[in-house]
Image: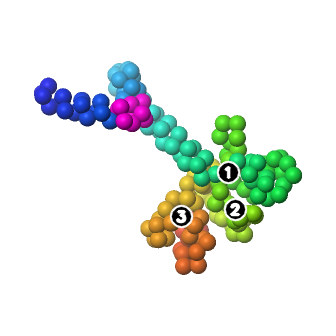
Amino acid sequence: MTAAIAPLARKVAVRAQEDSRFAQVLDALLTAPTSPQGTLERVAARQLSDQRRTALVEDFVDGSIRTPQVQKILTLRTPQAVHRLRSRGKLIGNAVGNQTWFPAWQFDGDRMRPDLPRILELLARFTSDPLAADRIMRLKHEELGNTSIAAALRKPKTTATAWQMLTSLGA
């Protein structure tokens, strides 16, 4: 049995050295209490959930722009004007740290994209979470030529399918 475990232990050690998230999960598993039954599974599930949420937030920020950039794009006088658009449901944004981030797909050059009100209305039927809405808009789909709904709405060839997908959210 020891001979069979050694190669596995080496593989785990190598992966832990290369992947810090994997190492964190291992650490949580090794330090978790083993009783009562189910505790270990809950600790691992919580750790995995935290990692997924962190990755989602990082992806959101990577595809977004900060309040001052939105203010400049829309030629608004104050950051508060940008936040009013957000609070009124005219833009999707989310605070991460001490910055508010707005998904870049909402903009078309120096203005809000013309179809944004309809997009936001359809997204609001499904979720009020800005990160989930951003994920929906940026996730690539084979039926859209391996592009996102946000990109497909800009292409005449895929517009109808993209609108259909967006309309069917939560149906």
Mark 1 and mark 3: Cα distance apart in space: 18 Å
Q: Secondary structure at mark 3?
A: strand
Mark positioned earlier in the residue sequence (1 or 3): 1
In percent of width and height, residue 55 lies at 51, 43
Q: Identify residue type, mark 2.
A: Phe
Tell me the chief SS of the magenta region.
helix
Outermost residue, right side: 77
Q: Nearer the viewer, mark 2 or mark 3?
A: 2
Badge 1 crowding class, 10 Å Cα cut-off, few under 14, some 14 to 19, many 20 or more, is some
In percent of width and height, residue 80 lies at 83, 47
Could you tell me which residue is drawn at 24 percent across and 29 percent down? 9
On whether residue 102 falls in the magenta region, the answer is no
Q: Which residue is mark 1?
A: 65
Q: Residue 119 occupies which quadrant of the picture?
A: bottom right
Q: Is residue 112 above or below residue 56?
A: below
Q: Identify residue type, mark 1.
A: Ile
Mark positioned earlier in the residue sequence (2 or 1): 1
Could you tell me which residue is drawn at 43 percent across and 35 percent down? 21
Q: Which residue is mark 3?
A: 148
Q: Nearer the viewer, residue 160 or 5?
A: 5
Disc 2, disc 1: CB below 8 Å? yes
